[in-house]
Image (cartoon, helix red, strand yellow):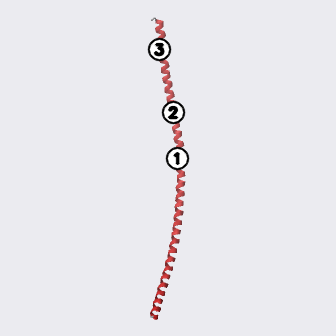
Amino acid sequence: MNDAQIIAISITVLAVLAGSVFNNVRIGDVSISLNRRIDDMKEVLRTQMDLRLERIDGRFERIDQRFERMDLAMNQRFEHTDSAINQRFERMDSKLDTIITMLFQLDTRVTKLEGRSS
């Protein structure tokens, strides 16, 4: 091999090595840029998810408030119905007491009448 061939091969090897180094630097730059973009997208997605979760929490709070109002209304209805039923039972008890008193009086009369006729 003569000197010209060695110089040509050396230049070729140096060019290839320089290209490899340059490509590695470019790949590193692309990697850094890509990592920045990914981090930016993460922040954007976190922000959007936080907003959506806040809206969902607001909806759940409104639903909880509606359930509480419904629960209060149902309790009031049940208390009113319970009161009405208790009043009816009390009237029925007083009427039954009156009927029992009347039956006792009739039984007493019948007993007296039977005693007279015998």
Amino acid type at mark 1: Leu
Mark 1 Cα-neighbour bin, 10 Å: few <14, some 14–19, many ≥20: few
Q: CA distance from mark 1 to mark 3?
A: 58 Å
Seen in the picture, residue 94 relative to 8 is either above or below; the reply is below
Circle 1/circle 3 CB separation < 8 Å:
no
- Which of the pair 91/107 is nearer the observer? 107
Q: Looking at the rendering, in which quadrant would you find the C terminus?
A: bottom left
The residue lying furthest to the top in this view is 2
Sequence-first tag of 1 and 2? 2
Name the spot of residue 116 as percent of width and height, x first: 46, 94
Q: Secondary structure at mark 3?
A: helix
Q: Residue at x 49, y 10 (%)?
A: 8
**Residue at numbered disc 2:** 36
Figure quadrant of the N terminus: top left
- Amino acid at dot 3: Val
**Placement of 47 over or under 8, stated as above or below:** below
The amino acid at mark 2 is: Arg
For label 3, the residue is: 13
Task: Tell me, for residue 106, which label it has, or none.
Answer: none
Q: Which residue is mark 1?
A: 53
Q: Tell me the SS state at disc 1.
A: helix
